[in-house]
Amino acid sequence: MKLHYEVAELRTKHPFTISTGSRETHPVVWVRLYDSDGLEGWGEANPVAYYGETPETVCAALESFRRILEPSGDPFAILEIEAACEADVGGNASARAAVSAALYDLMGKQLNVPVYRLLGLDPSQAARTSFTIGIDDPEVIRQRVREAAEYPILKIKVGTRHDEEVLTVVREEAPEKIIRVDANTAWTAKQALARIEKLSVFDLEFVEQPLPAGDIEGLRFVRERSPLPIIADESCITSKDIPRLAGVVDGINIKLAKCGGLSEALRMIHTARAHNMSVMIGCMLESSLGVAAAAQLAPLSDYADLDGAALLAEDPFSGFDISHGWLHLTGEPGLGVSKR
Ligand SMILES: [Mg+2]
């Protein structure tokens, strides 16, 4: 297989703020793997500084993977290739996730089937996705909720002193919608309990990552007392994190850019299920190329948060759409997306 990669920049429709920072542009790295018949497998790396990655570290990791990928002509050796890439650099999850997606895309194209069929999954069984609204002034939030009219589920970023004001506005505009909140590590355990108690009057579905990633005992303390279910995101990177989160949180949020690819995401799903935990499939700010890879696994999840491309001013890829929260994959081979 021949490896090619390029850095690109995604731009969001609006500046996007969460409790740990704000940004308008988002660099990604597109990976292509060519087989000897000229078929192309595509994948997107979505480096997140919080997890120690930048476009530069992604490119350095990919350059290192060249000597693993190029001598191999067989994308179906995927588990071996993924393990070799992990052993090669450690970490660098989004770089490895791009390679993983490109390998699955190429396998699907070689067999002329969508990746979800390779995995034995039916995309019509996927959960509807939420639409995410970042931290902003309440009147801006009101506008965002109106713009998200077609979405039945909203994910509201919280973690400021204005959370109640924000949720009051959201409920005024969307009295019937399912609303989940994400604090992105903003609170201590004591703060979280007080905040969740106050926010629970807004009829919320669950709270994502109320505490710093490493505060596992804090999460247990909060979950035992919280009126709302707790989902771990930053505390749960790979399947190895799941056993110690059993009994500590109600569920986990899986993202390819955290765990390193579709095979590890599948391991996470099975590990979580073995521990009776619920499963959410999420994404970063990604184009449809990145989101389509995660969407292949959505039929195995309870909750989907796959609106990354819907937050963009322009999506460089076509073939994956969302309407009224339903995920639509084209049925084309591989990931089913192509560059516009
Ligand atoms: Mg989150």
Image (tube, helix red, strand yellow):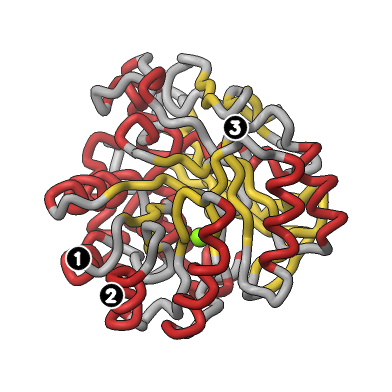
Which residue does the image show at 50% across and 23% down from the upper left? 336
Q: Mark 2 points at which residue?
A: 220
Q: Is mark 1 on a helix, strand or loop?
A: loop
Q: Earlier in the sequence, mark 3 or mark 1?
A: 3
Against 281, is 52 above or below?
below
Task: Report how far apart the C-alphas of labels 3 and 2 lie in the structure.
Answer: 30 Å
Q: Which of 45 and 156 is in front in this view?
A: 156
Which residue does the image show at 71% across and 44% down from the upper left? 311
Residue 247 marker? 1
Q: What residue type is labelled 2?
A: Arg
Q: Earlier in the sequence, mark 2 or mark 1?
A: 2
Q: Mark 3 points at which residue?
A: 152
Image quarter of residue 181: bottom right
Q: Which of 217 and 52 is in front in this view?
A: 217
Quick one: label 2, few (<14), some, or many (20+) residues within 10 Å? some
Circles 2, 1 touching at the beta carbon (< 8 Å): yes
Q: What element carries label 2?
A: helix
Give the position of the N terminus as an image quadrant.
top left
Q: Is mark 1 within 8 Å of ligand 1?
A: no
Q: Is mark 3 within 8 Å of ligand 1?
A: no
Q: Position of residue 248 (x, y in %)?
A: 25, 69
Q: Which amino acid does label 3 sit on?
A: Pro
Which residue does the image show at 53% across and 25% down from the upper left? 326
Against 191, is 254 above or below?
above
